[in-house]
Image: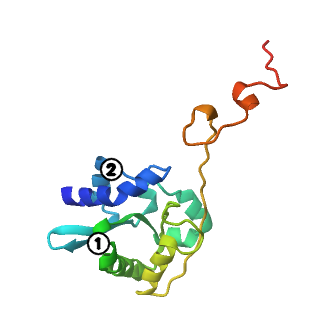
Amino acid sequence: MDQLWTLYVRAYLPTAQDTVTHEMLERAEFTAQLTLETNRAWVVWDGSRPVAMTLISTDVRSTRWLSELYFEKHFPERMKAGQVHYIVWAVVDPDHVATGAVIHLGKHALAAEAQDGALLVFDTPETNQPKETGGSAELLVRLARMVSEAELLPITVQRYFAIDFAPGRSPSRGQGTADAEQGQGDERVLSG
């Protein structure tokens, strides 16, 4: 388990540092996910060292990341058949990205999903998918097509925003107008 955790952290750390969402699981949640009977873990080994790993949930009701209500509304027959699956994570050791580990992992894990006739749901941060086309979504559908007929279905986009109440003190952002920063203007707050 320690080797898998080390791989997970090593592979996910750059994404976690560049993504606003809490992409990395804590150790206890990572271990719990690996032990759930509804999850499938696939690991590629280089000798005694894990170099790629994916975890797929075969029951979205057992995850905290997907809304079963959404899938019951939009894919009711697939939900009833237990065919909505979710890629909880897919990681590759940065030193093994170009070694074929991704293809090996994809072929084996996706073959099982294809055999189930799954609607395999995944999400990806903007760092891995900067545009609607290409990126990790294109890579995954190409891997899927190596084992079966497959279609990529864009589901939704979620965007994160922030309201900066101290724009003059934010070192990474530009300065606002002096009036806005000072709270000056024509509007007044009335107290009762």
- Examine the rendered structure and indicate whether residue 178 appears above or below residue 54: above
The count of marks equals 2
Q: Is residue 93 visible?
A: no
Check disc 2 and report its element: helix, strand or loop. Answer: helix
93 left or right of 3 in image: right
In the image, what residue type sits under mark 1?
His
How far across and how far down the image is residue 179, in percent? 76, 29
In whole angstroms, how far apart are the C-alphas of marks 2 and 1?
Answer: 25 Å
How far across and how far down the image is residue 62, in percent? 41, 57
Task: Point out the frontmost of discs 2 and 1.
Answer: 1
Q: Nearer the viewer, residue 130 or 142?
A: 130
In the image, what residue type sits under mark 2?
Glu
Colour approach in the figure: rainbow
Q: Residue at x 48, y 79 (%)?
A: 141
Tell me the number on the disc at residue 96. 1
Residue sitting at the far top: 192
Which residue is disc 2 drawn over?
Answer: 29
